[in-house]
Image (cartoon, helix red, strand yellow):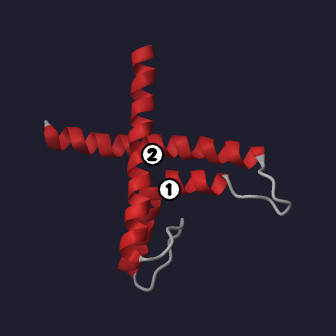
Amino acid sequence: MVKELLLAAFIMGVGLCVAGAGTHLYQWVSRQRALLRYDGETFVASMGNVAMSFICGPYLMLQLGWTQEDDGTLSVGSALVAAMVAFGWAFITGLLFMGAYVAIRY
């Protein structure tokens, strides 16, 4: 059972690494801030934003959880919810990229 838990943690780690690298690469190439969005000038741009939001979503959710309230404090509830969503999302993203790696490699 420990092996399965470590495998799940490894997949989540891969998902977070891909999301973080994708976010910084997107911001570097497009010269704009990465956001969770689905708008765009054309249909192709809109689908590009959806794909970026799916891949970079876990990293962006972790950043959203650490936003400050009006009085300068952090909300523990929003940080925990954002972390739960981000790590679940990172598992899906990591599973997608690990599956693609295994399919291509073997």
Which residue lies at the image location 72% right of the left edge and 49% below the top edge?
Answer: 78
Above or below for 12 versus 44 = above
Instruction: Name the amino acid, label 2.
Output: Leu
Which residue lies at the image location 86% right of the left edge and 60% below the top edge?
Answer: 71
Mark 2 or 1, nearer chain start: 2
- The residue lying toward the viewer, choosing from 75 and 82, is 75
Element at label 1: helix
- The residue lying toward the viewer, choosing from 28 and 95, is 28
- The residue lying toward the viewer, choosing from 28 and 15, is 28
* For the residues bearing labels 2 and 1, Cβ distance under 8 angstroms: no
Q: Quadrant of residue 94?
A: top left
Q: Position of residue 101 (x, y in %)?
A: 23, 42
Per the model, the C-alpha gap separating discs 2 and 1 is: 9 Å
Q: Position of residue 39 (x, y in %)?
A: 50, 77
Which residue lies at the image location 39% right of the left edge and 35% below the top edge?
Answer: 11
Q: Residues within 10 Å of mark 2 (few under 14, many from 20)?
A: many
Q: Which mark is residue 57?
A: 1
Q: Which residue is mark 2?
A: 16
